[in-house]
Each structure stands twice: as C-alpha cells, then as structure tokens.
C-alpha cells in the first residue's frame, strides 16, 4: 500500500516539474524585456540647501519583448520620479527623470528609486547622491 502511494506521489511531482519547464519555455518564446542603464547611481555633487536639481537616467530595453514600467518610487518625499507610461520596445531607449529637492537636507545624502517592471528581476534600483551645504549652519559652526 505504501509503495503505491510513493509511486503516485512521484508521478505527481514529475508532473509539476514538467509544468514548470513548460512555463519556462513559454516565457522564453514570449520574450523577456531587460533594463540596461548607462548609469545606475548619479552624484549631484555639492548643492546648496533648498536647491532643486534634476537628472535623467537613460536606459535601453536590451531584451526581446516590450518593457512596461509599472511604477517608480523613491524612499523620500524630496525626490519626484517621472517615467515612460508607454511600452518601450526591444532596442528602444527611454528615460527615468528624477528631481531632488535639497530643502531640509544637510550633509551627504543618498536616496534610492525603486522601479517595478515586467523584467525578469521585477525591481530595479537607481540612486542619487549629493553633498548638501547649508550656509547658516556653516556660519554658526565657524563662531
């Protein structure tokens, strides 16, 4: 009796594996989009507190299917992100536009942007850095 159970269980497991392989093959046939960024971290250098700076991260869809960006979010309200809402075709380029407001920030700043898409990795991270200077703090620290 136990022997039959083992045979049935092994048969069911092999069926699951076959379905997984079939799904992988279907994904390969359908194609997979892929982000390739020229730069994944951008350094704004020194900025004055209150200054607003912007940068466009250029990317290319080097995959073999249309790239769809579902969302792009930052870990801070001081960063706004704009991204293409249309499908980026294989071989085409696009831009993720980032604007950073340094108001209320001081010193070395590191902010991440998480992009959710239909790529194999599902999430891609970009980052910006800056060294925010505040003249008032510098004046008081010299005295």
Image: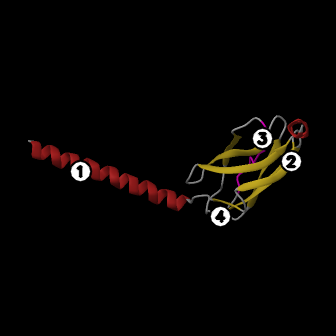
Residue position for label 4:
62
Residue ID at (65%, 50%): 125
Residue ID at (82%, 44%): 132
* Left or right: 7, with 131 as reference point: left
Q: How many marks?
A: 4
Residue position for label 3:
79
* Tag in front: 1 or 3: 3
**Badge 4 element:** loop
Neighbor class of circle 2 (other Cα within 10 Å; few <14, some 14-19, many 20+) is some
Residue ID at (28%, 53%): 14
First in sequence: mark 2 vs mark 3: 2
Residue 136 is a magenta residue: no
Q: Residue 82 in the image: x percent, y percent?
A: 78, 45
Residue position for label 1:
11
Q: Residue 59 in the image: x percent, y percent?
A: 72, 59
Residue position for label 2:
47
Neighbor class of circle 1 (other Cα within 10 Å; few <14, some 14-19, many 20+) is few
* Left or right: 26, with 80 as reference point: left
What whole-number distance in Å separates the C-alpha atoms at marks 2 and 3?
15 Å
Q: Residue 47 in the image: x percent, y percent?
A: 86, 47
Q: Residue furthest front?
A: 143
């Amino acid at each position: 009796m136990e022997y039959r159970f083992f045979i049935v269980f092994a048969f069911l497991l092999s069926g699951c594996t076959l379905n997984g392989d079939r799904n992988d093959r279907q994904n390969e046939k359908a194609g997979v989009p892929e982000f390739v960024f020229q730069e994944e971290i951008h350094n704004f250098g020194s900025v004055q507190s209150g200054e607003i700076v912007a940068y466009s991260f250029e990317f290319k869809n080097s995959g073999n299917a249309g790239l769809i960006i579902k969302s792009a979010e930052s870990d801070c309200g001081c960063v706004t992100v704009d991204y293409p809402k249309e499908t980026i075709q294989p071989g085409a380029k696009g831009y993720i536009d980032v604007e950073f407001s340094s108001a209320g920030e001081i010193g070395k700043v590191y902010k991440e942007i998480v992009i959710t898409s239909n790529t194999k990795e599902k999430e891609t991270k970009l980052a910006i850095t800056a060294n925010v200077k505040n003249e008032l703090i510098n004046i008081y620290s010299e005295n």
